[in-house]
């Protein structure tokens, strides 16, 4: 058989990449070009946040591909990959390496979902979108931040984050609260939960292992932190945001929530869950399956907001 015929046969040999993967690839394929990251963000926590973390399957076709301190999720489908959040500017390279370590191709990413418009969560959008040609999905306010390359002016943290700039992103599709977005047999739903930022967005979908499908939640931050001069109870620059923030927290509490991952892994005790999973025995419950995780996160956020409101009202002039 001629060498040309042998080459053709090798290209036609299709193999499955990884358990739970649905993206077919050929045994012989053209190597991907190298991702070119944007200049790194500089902050006190950046090195810790961007330290490498081994990627792992969370459940079914959902994987964690982010670095140590900021989250990024990968959802695999027969039509391509969905990436949820991109971390810092320098996290783009870590995410790219983690996707490839799992046996997938980063250039198969077709959708990039975003949480809120701060550099530690959307800093890598520009580089990864440029590399993959994916469509970015964002809430109206997060889309505005991506167009500005910085937080929107009404962001509670804006004046204390002078370095919170990031490369602007294009080809951003604005999504509506509760919109059902079908892609590759997966339906993803954005839940816009303003408070921590005006455009904060929690995403939900289902992942399955055999006949068992679980409700996955990528929970955006609902913490009531801000710059020193900002008042959630309102002032001359803006009305009170307390009731809308409380509504956002209640939304997160009420989500169907079998497995929850937060935008910063520490907020959902990821390291503790991974340690427990590493020592699991046959018949043990998976520590990531925690149906009350969203309620626990929301309860803590509501208590913190109530304390913040009490302090603001006590000091209001």
Image (tube, rainbow, N blue to C red):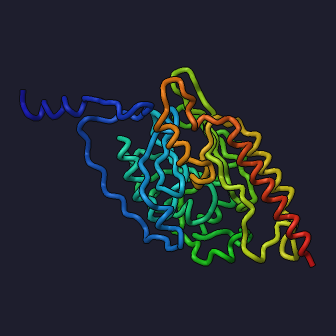
Q: Residue at x 53, y 23 (%)?
A: 283
> Which image quarter is the C terminus in?
bottom right
- Check the image and report above or below for 236 versus 222: below
Residue 291 visible, this orientation: yes
Q: Is residue 123 left or right of residue 175?
A: left
Task: Give the percent coordinates (x, y) of residue 58.
Answer: 51, 38
Q: Residue at x 75, y 54 (%)?
A: 301
Task: Give the percent coordinates (x, y) of residue 235.
Answer: 87, 74
> Nearest the camera: 26 or 316?
316
> Nearest the camera: 128 or 271?
271
Q: Is residue 139 left or right of residue 7?
A: right
Q: Residue at x 55, y 37 (%)?
A: 183
> Which image quarter is the N terminus in?
top left
Residue 130 visible, this orientation: no
- Check the image and report above or below for 118 versus 257: below
State the count of labels.
0
Write down the quadrant of residue 26 in the picture: top left
Q: Is residue 256 left or right of residue 128?
A: right
Task: Give the percent coordinates (x, y) of residue 123.
Answer: 52, 64
Write down the quadrant of residue 91 in the picture: bottom left
Task: Give the percent coordinates (x, y) of residue 159.
Answer: 69, 77
The extreme left residue here reads 2
Q: Residue at x 72, y 39 (%)?
A: 255
- Check the image and report above or below for 37 versus 57: below
The extreme top residue here reads 211
């Amino acid at each position: 058989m001629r060498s040309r015929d042998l080459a053709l046969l090798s290209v036609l040999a299709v193999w499955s990449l990884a358990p739970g993967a649905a993206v077919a690839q050929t045994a012989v394929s053209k190597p991907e070009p190298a991702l070119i990251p944007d200049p790194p963000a500089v902050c006190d926590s950046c090195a810790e946040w961007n330290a490498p973390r081994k990627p792992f399957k969370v459940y079914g076709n959902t994987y964690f591909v982010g670095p140590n301190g900021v989250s990024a999720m990968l959802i695999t489908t027969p039509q391509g990959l969905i990436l949820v959040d991109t971390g810092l500017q320098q996290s783009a390279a870590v995410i790219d390496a983690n996707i490839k370590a799992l046996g997938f191709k980063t250039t198969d990413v077709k959708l990039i979902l975003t949480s809120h418009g701060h550099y530690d969560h959307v800093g890598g959008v520009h580089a990864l979108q440029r590399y993959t040609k994916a469509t970015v999905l964002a809430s109206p306010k997060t889309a505005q931040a991506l167009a500005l390359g910085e937080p929107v002016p009404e962001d509670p943290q804006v004046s204390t984050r002078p370095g919170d700039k990031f490369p602007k992103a294009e080809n951003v599709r604005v999504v509506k609260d509760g919109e059902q977005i079908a892609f590759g047999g997966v339906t993803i739903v954005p839940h816009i939960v303003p408070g921590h930022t005006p455009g904060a967005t929690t995403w939900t979908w289902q992942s399955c292992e055999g006949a068992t499908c679980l409700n996955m939640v990528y929970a955006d931050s609902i913490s009531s932190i801000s710059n020193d001069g900002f008042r959630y109870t309102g002032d001359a620059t803006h009305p009170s945001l307390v009731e809308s923030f409380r509504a956002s927290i209640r939304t997160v509490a009420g989500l169907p929530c079998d497995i929850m991952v937060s935008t910063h892994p520490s907020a959902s005790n990821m390291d503790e869950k991974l340690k427990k999973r590493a020592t699991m025995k046959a018949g043990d419950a998976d520590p990531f399956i925690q149906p009350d995780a969203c309620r626990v996160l929301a309860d803590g956020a509501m208590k913190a907001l109530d304390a913040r409101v009490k302090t603001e009202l006590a000091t209001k002039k």
